[in-house]
Amino acid sequence: MHEYSLVTALLDRVEAVAREHGATAVSAVRVRVGELSGVELSLLATAYELARTDTLCATAPLELLTEPARWECTACGTAVAADGPRRCGLCGAPARLVAGGEMLLERVEMEVPDV
């Protein structure tokens, strides 16, 4: 299950961000996952629940958002339909994936003591 290793890396990154800001706890985490990323959302959520114990994220819920796949022409930038041929309907150039293949840490809410 590669989702567990993804969560381990996610928690490492969230804790690094929290330390940079002097946070005492993390209260929420939001991650955007592309539909073509190869990440199974239910497995990611389960891995997060198991791995967050004894971390700054121990009580922080994980919000998962799905990013739909978007393709565009490599030559002219025209949007290319996700359910059709991977070529531009205007100029015939190949399409490239511009969104939907990534996993992004989008938001970390932290508790920071008054200075």
Image (spheres, rainbow, N blue to C red):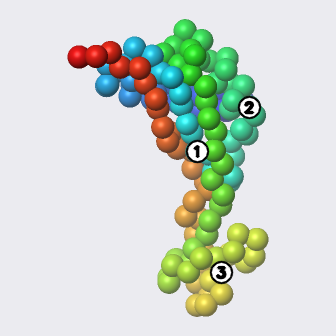
- Element type at mark 3: loop
Find out whether the residues at labels 1 and 2 contact each other: C-beta distance under 8 Å. Answer: no
Q: CA distance from mark 2 to mark 3?
A: 33 Å
Q: Position of residue 99 (x, y in %)?
A: 57, 59
Q: Reading the chain from its start, which is encountered first: label 2 or label 3?
A: 2
Q: Which mark is residue 18?
A: none
Q: Position of residue 42 (x, y in %)?
A: 75, 34
The numbered mark at residue 87 is 3
Give residue 83's position: percent from left, percent from top.
Answer: 76, 71
Nearest the eye: 97 or 26 = 26
Residue at (68, 24) in percent of width and height = 47
Q: Which element is circle 2 on? A: helix
Q: Name the residue rendered at 55%, 36% in the picture.
A: 30
Disc 1 target residue = 32
Q: Which image quadrant for residue 110?
A: top left
Asked whether residue 15 appears in the rendered view, the answer is no
Along the viewing direction, whichever of 8 and 61 lies nearer the viewer: 61
**Mark 2 sits on what residue?**
43
First in residue order: circle 1 vs circle 3: 1
Q: Amino acid at mark 3?
A: Arg
115 shown above or below 63:
above
Label 2 sits on what residue type? Leu
Q: Residue 106 location, x and y as percent?
A: 49, 42
**Nearer to the camera, 60 or 5:** 60
Quadrant in the rendering for residue 91: bottom right
Tell us which disc is closer to us: 1 or 2. 1
- Is residue 87 toward the left or the right of residue 106 in the image? right
